[in-house]
Amino acid sequence: MNLLRIERALISVYDKTNLLSFVKELRNFGITIYASGGTYNFLKNNGFIVNSTEELTGIVSILDGRVKTLHPSIHASILADKGNENHLKQLQEMNLNPIDLVVVNFYPFEKVVEQKNISELDIIENIDIGGPTLVRSAAKNFNSVIVVTEPGQYDVLIEELNFNNGFVTLNTRRKFAEKAFQKLTKYDIEISNYFNKDNFFNLSLNLEKTLRYGENPHQFGWLYGEFESIFNCIHGKELSYNNILDITSAMDVVLEFDEIACAIIKHNSPCGVALGNSTFEAYEKALKCDPVSAFGGIVAFNKPIDEDTAKKLNEIFLELILLPEISDSVLSILKIKKDRRLVIYSIDKIKHWQNRYTKEFRSITGGVVVQTKDLVSIVDDKIQIVSDSIPDDKELDDMKFAFKVSKHVKSNSIVIAKGRKTIGICGGQTSRVDSVRFAIFRAKQFNHNLKDAVMASDGFFPFYDGIELAAKEGIKAIIQPGGSIRDNEIKDFVNKNKIKMAFTNIRHFKH
């Protein structure tokens, strides 16, 4: 049965967005409409004469509204296979007619759970039973029924009805059924996660797009979730798998700071981070850290940029620019580079996502490892000055800045900073002393003056060898988590060499 004529519809929705205009369109096709409970009252109060589902069931809503549509008459009308003569005969004997269209969306369980100070009784009352049951029945019988599960599908259905004179195709019915089963899975997972907490790992994300390839051209790649509702690529080439990873890393760095911040990312790791009094200053300082690595990288800001900054960004090849918002004048400047990607992100949506999904996961052979996200930043009250020499306010500001950046560099992470800008970054080495050595090398490579700089480490120093290397270069202050069994030896060394040192009591490994 390729074409299905819509003659009767059942509507039961919590979200009534665009419902009135949709019902008005359905009326134009002479479709008989049945509605339940609140939906019936809503339509009636807005001047629509529709039938109540009680006319199908012969009973009123019972158990304080828990049972309205859970009835054989309704589900028989939905589940009848129109290609099965026996089914149609049974409907006739029951004095029933097939329902061709089911329009249902669910109680917002996810939003209810997010509310503060809500009781478990209220949460349980927002577990929808009848809605998912209707949707499952209609989706199973997509050969004979079309199921609509969100207001965004209304226009698609009306367009098809107009094009086909009141009929819908099998292809559309199947697509809507696919969407319905996705909704059911997601809804059940939300409920399961509430009750099961950490006993099961459940995740349901929609496929947003198939990527050109994965990390390498021989790998396939897909994007799932709500990434494109948070990050909007408004210009340039399509985002790649690696772009998406870099965007996430860059965003994490710049949103670490309330001050104007710029981060330059290459291969998922910072190669320059700075704070400034303007976006122009922040970018210039970040670029000077490592201008070679910055070539072909991505640049992120946590504040809107001005025209001067936009012109400065056009001076070198950059793969992508990430901004919280953009003006028309800045956009016109940046669009001069035709292929370079411009991505605008929503801070509010990022915060909502982080509050909603507090865990991160990584696939391993045999399963998945899961942890809470590292959203903890440096806490002033936990900082301990453990050296005899006390850093002044400017030095302590640089130390905290460097430590915040170290959080986003692969372990063993070392960040050297001066004047609220990085001048040497290294991570991913198998020994911390090598990270110190290479961070110093990077700083010297680009003629940065290490005298009176500060150094941050994401983990404790197991020996004072890395600190000794820093001291020889004139680095005057070091910030690290502390916690080594040799902490006392390290304190003796820094005091002997008049180095200032702070412990954060927070570790930021990033494997």
Image (spheres, helix red, strand yellow):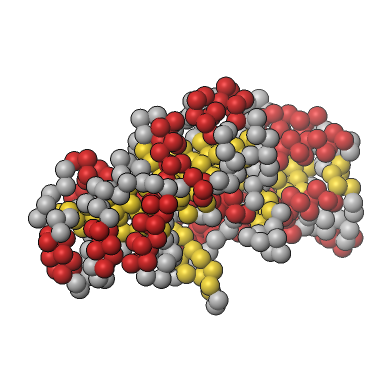
Q: Is residue 414 above or below residue 307?
A: below
438 or 222: which is nearer to us?
A: 438
Q: In which quarter of the view is residue 487 placed?
A: bottom left
Q: Residue at x 38, y 41 (%)?
A: 274
Query: Seen in the image, is 446 located left or right of residue 75?
Result: left
On the rendered image, what quadrant is the N terminus found in?
bottom right
Query: Where 254 falls versus 132 (above or below)?
Result: above
Q: Nearer the viewer, residue 395 or 100?
A: 395
State left or right for residue 118 relative to residue 192. Answer: left
Instruction: Determine the residue positioned at 89% across, 58% down.
Output: 83
Q: Position of residue 391 (x, y in %)?
A: 16, 47
Q: Is residue 80 visible?
A: yes
- Between 93 and 499, the residue placed more toward the observer is 499
Residue 478, percent across and down? Answer: 24, 55
Q: In the figure, 347 relative to 146: above or below? A: above
Check the picture and name the quadrant holding the C terminus.
bottom left
Occupied quadrant, residue 459: bottom left
Residue situated furthest left in the rendering: 388
Residue at far bottom of view = 366
Q: Position of residue 314 (x, y in %)?
A: 58, 33
Q: Residue, x 28% and y 62% (percent of image)? A: 469
Q: Is residue 339 left or right of residue 402?
A: right
Residue shown at 30%/44% (left/top)? 418
Q: Is residue 37 visible?
A: no
> In the figure, is residue 386 to the left or right of 111?
left
